[in-house]
Image (cartoon, grey):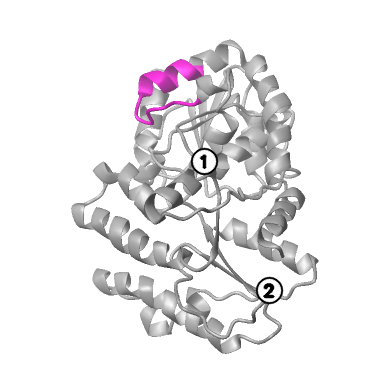
Amino acid sequence: MEHFIRVLANGLQANGYLVEFFHRDNCLPARLRQLSNRFARYATDALLGWYVGRRVQKVLDDQVVAIVSNSTIGWYPVRGLPRAAKKLHFCHGTYRGQAEATRRLLAWRGYLKMKWWDSMVLERASCRGNLTLCNSDQTREEVKLFFDREAPTAYCPLDTTHFRPMNRLACRTELGLSDDKPVGLFVGSLQPVKNFSLMRQLIEQLPQVRWLLALRGEVPLDMEGNANLHVFQDVSHEQLPRLYGAADFSVCPSIYESFGLVVAEALACGTPVIASPGGASRLFLGQPPLNRLLISDPCSVAEFRAAVLEVLFEPDFFRQLVLERVRPQLEELMAPVNWLRRFADITGL
C-alpha cells in the first residue's frame, strides 16, 4: 500500500497536481496512537477512518479533484465535495479473503474480527459510494463475491528499471557467493501468512541448494550453522535486485497474497518463481509451461520440491521463458509510466 501511494503521488505531482496525505500520524490524536488495551486498539480502526474523514472534510474546497482512500479508510461520508471531484477507493486485498485463507492460523475471535469487523463492516463501507479499484483479479473477485461490487483491476506499479535482469555470476560475486551450487531465494518474513514453515522443510530436503533468505524483521536463530543458508535481514531496496539476480529460482509459498510484489520483482529480474496462487502468480504464471511453477496447495512440500527440481533440471529454459514472455507483460502492466496511464484512463484523472 505504501508503495502504491508513493508511486501514485509522484505521478500525480509530476502531472501538476498538489497531493496531500492524511494518515494515522497526522490525524489520530496522540493519546490514541499507542494504546495498550487490545480492544481499545480495535476501536481505533474505526476511529482512524472517522478522524481522517473529518480532517478531509475540513480542507475541502473547489480545487479538490479527487479523494483516494485505501483499506479500511474511506467510509466517512464526506459532504460538500465539488461536483466534478472523484471519490476513489483502492482495494489491496480483502480482510475476509485473508481471514478465510488463514483461518487455521487465527484464534476464533481474531478470525471473526478480521472477517466481520475489518472486512464486512469497514472495508465494505469504504467501497460504498466510491469508484473502487483493485490490485489484482484475485482481489476483484473477492470484492465482487463479498461486497457485491464491480471493481476494475488497476494492478500495482513496479520500477522495472530497478528490478531488471542482471549478470548472475556478477551478483553472486558481489554477495560473496561461490558458483558451485544452484541458488534458491525466499523474500519475506517469518509471519505465518508467508508460510516460512514450508521453507524450512524445503531447505532440509534440498541440501544441494544454497539458500538465500531476505527477511524483514525477525530471523530464524535456530537455523544458524547451516552452511547452505545465507540470511539477509532488512535488505535495502537497492540490494534486492542483486539477490534476485543471484538466484536460479525464487520461492513464494504464501498462504494468502492479494498481489505479491516479491513474485513480480523476481520475474522482472528474469528469475523463475515457484509460487502458491496469488494475484501476481496467477497473472504471470497462469499459462503453460510456466503454470507448472504455480502450486495449488501452499502447504504441499512435495509439489514445491518437484517444481524446484524441474527448474534446476532446465534453468536456462525457464529463465528464457520469463524473459521472453513474462517481463514484456509485466512492463506493460506495471512499469510506472504505463501503470499511471492506465490508472488515469480508469479514473479520468
Answer left or right for 17 relative to 28.
right
Residue marked by disc 1: 279
Q: Quadrant of residue 198?
A: top left
Residue at image coords 64%, 82%: 82
Q: Nearer the viewer, residue 98 or 34?
A: 98
In the picture, the disc for residue 168 is: none
Q: Is residue 138 above or below residue 46?
A: above
Answer left or right for 247 relative to 229.
right
Q: Nearer the viewer, residue 146 or 240?
A: 146
Residue at image coords 72%, 40%: 331
| Residue 175 appears in the figure | no
Q: Element type at marker 2? A: loop
Q: Quadrant of the N terminus?
A: bottom right
Give the x, y percent position of residue 92.
50, 54
Give the x, y percent position of residue 187.
52, 40
Q: Element type at marker 1? A: helix
Which callout, 1 or 2, points at the residue further toward the start of the chain? Answer: 2
Residue at image coords 42%, 83%: 30
Q: Nearer the viewer, residue 330 or 245?
A: 330
Answer left or right for 328 relative to 141.
right
Assess disc 2: are there few (<14), some (14-19) or many (≥20) residues with their C-alpha within 10 Å of its C-alpha. Answer: few
Q: Nearer the viewer, residue 108 or 81?
A: 81
* Residue 305 belongs to the span the image colors magenta: yes
Residue marked by disc 2: 19
Give the x, y percent position of residue 209.
50, 20
Mark 1 residue type: Gly
Report the magenta residues as a range. 294-308
Mark 2 residue type: Val
Label 1, label 2: how far apart the Cα atoms are = 28 Å
